[in-house]
Amino acid sequence: MIVGVPREIYPGERRVALVPGVIASLAKAGMEVVIEAGSGASAGYMDADYLAKGAKIAAERTEVFRTADVIVQVLCYGANDRTGNEDVPLMRRDQALIGFLRPLGSEQSVKEIAATGVRAFSMELMPRITRAQSMDVLSSMATVGGYKAVLLAADMLPRLFPMMSTAAGTVTPARIFVIGAGVAGLQAIATSRRLGAVTSAYDMRPVAKEQVMSLGGRFVELPIEAKDAQDASGYAREQGEDFYRKQRELLGQVVSESDVVITTAVIPGKKSPILVTGEMVQKMAPGSVIVDLAAERGGNCELTVPGEISIQHDVTIVGLFNLASTVPYHASQMYAKNVATFLLHLVKDGKLRLDIADEIIRDTWLTDGGEIVNKRLRELYSLPALAAPAAASTGTVEPSGPADAGEVKKP
Ligand SMILES: NC(=O)c1ccc[n+]([C@@H]2O[C@H](COP(=O)([O-])OP(=O)(O)OC[C@H]3O[C@@H](n4cnc5c(N)ncnc54)[C@H](O)[C@@H]3O)[C@@H](O)[C@H]2O)c1
């Protein structure tokens, strides 16, 4: 089985989907890697490093798509909404595609991908179960993003982070407030603490309190309770506008007393709730910094300009996307390890093991044989249930891809 890695083409993207370090484990399972020349260079992985581990280098992108049984990317079309459509004509029916596809936010591109007949697996849809933790790319990238958010804030803040007692006097530590203590938020708290800042955090999921405190952060308690704060997968549930309004009122004072606010509050597939208003920004001290990690889905701060750094009311507001790509060496290493683990799970004896009874495969399997085969996505897009795949959750889906492309296990 040939696994192909095309160069990432989203403008400014520096990650690569596979690093040389995972090639040996794939080879052991009968997978050969073909990588487009120069794909790893911006992350610090040279063609010679891939060659030394037994990969082949293809001079042309078209050659990668032509020869590979499985294409592995970081940002596939869908997640790459700028240039990803260039790959659509290269996708083919007897091929698998694995990567970020942003299925909850890009219906049109998912439909175009499905129409090529490609068998796509969306890494965003990985279930949050213990067995799948080593394949969880969202957590890996959130870890890198949370770390980088603090470094950006430290760089832009006109103050020092740690307390310092010097001959020139005592410097008081910076006050950092993290809203949303999930994977990114917890990493932001840990990084901020390492830099010596006084760090506090808030999350509407009550279980987050203990996690914040175990990292040395102060948990900000608000006298409101979210309804069914968390779903079965551990994700926050969307709340009503009343709840968000109350949150904003209560968060106002903490925000205005903070030098840095890092917001990470997202609801999968929904617009992010506004938790920091323009009025709250206005009350912050001049030079303060907000890093809005929810910017890609509209942002948690009312004044965030998605994709940009702006200065408003003398406060720097960072709305940049995709911070993980700015730490490409380790972000690629983590992504590659997650994807390689998924490949090893999916491929058995040189074939895709399409066992629909396996939650990991069933949940990530997005398109096949010209259709969107994922039950959750069909519901989200208001598509009628597929005749056979209507029973997706009961394990009887048989994709209409070519019979020799994979083994479909019917329980
Ligand atoms: N395999 C697994 O078991 C697994 C994998 C990854 C994450 N998790 C857990 O899932 C949880 C969430 O993970 P995530 O970081 O990916 O979530 P996320 O990126 O979807 O959300 C970020 C955080 O924002 C919070 N949030 C959302 N709306 C909010 C609001 N209005 N006010 C305050 N906070 C708000 C959420 O509760 C969450 O903690 C974590 O507890 C994490 O440990 C489990």
Image (cartoon, rainbow, N blue to C red):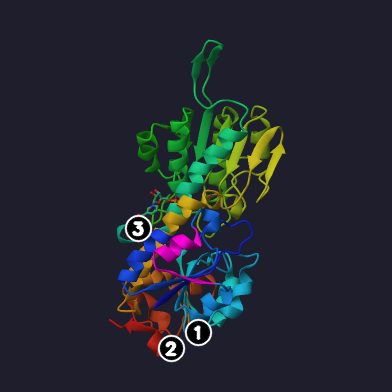
Above or below 271: residue 172? above
Read off the residue under disc 1: 93
Q: Are marks 2 and 3 in contact (CB under 8 Å)?
A: no
Say whether marks 1 and 2 touch (CB < 8 Å): yes
Q: Depth check: 133 or 405 in front?
A: 405
Q: Is residue 223 above or below residue 292?
A: above
Q: Secondary structure at mark 2?
A: loop
N-terminal-most mark, 1 or 2: 1
The residue that appears at 58% across and 29% down in the rendered structure is 259
Q: Secondary structure at mark 3?
A: helix
Q: Give how far across and how far down residue 177 sits, in percent.
A: 52, 34
Q: Quadrant of residue 393?
A: bottom left
Q: Who's the residue at 52% across and 81% down the image?
A: 66
Q: Circle 2: is it few (<14), some (14-19), or many (20+) Cα within 10 Å?
A: few
The residue that label 2 is drawn on is: 402
Between discs 2 and 3, the one toward the N terminus: 3
Q: CA distance from mark 3 to mark 1?
A: 29 Å
The amino acid marked with disc number 1 is Arg
Query: Does residue 2 appear in this view?
Result: yes
What whole-number distance in Å separates the C-alpha atoms at marks 1 and 2?
Answer: 8 Å
User: Is 240 situated left or right of 375 in this image?
Assistant: right
Q: Position of residue 356 (x, y in %)?
A: 34, 76
Q: Left or right: where does residue 12 sit relative to residue 161?
A: right
User: Which region shows up in magenta?
Assistant: 46-58
Query: Label 1: how many residues lie within 10 Å, few (<14), some (14-19) or many (20+)?
Result: some
Give the quarter of the figure containing the C terminus.
bottom left
Question: What residue is disc 3 on?
Answer: 134
- Spot occupied by residue 84 in the image (x, y as percentages of width and height): 61, 69
Q: Amino acid at mark 2?
A: Pro
- On screen, 109 above or below 178? below
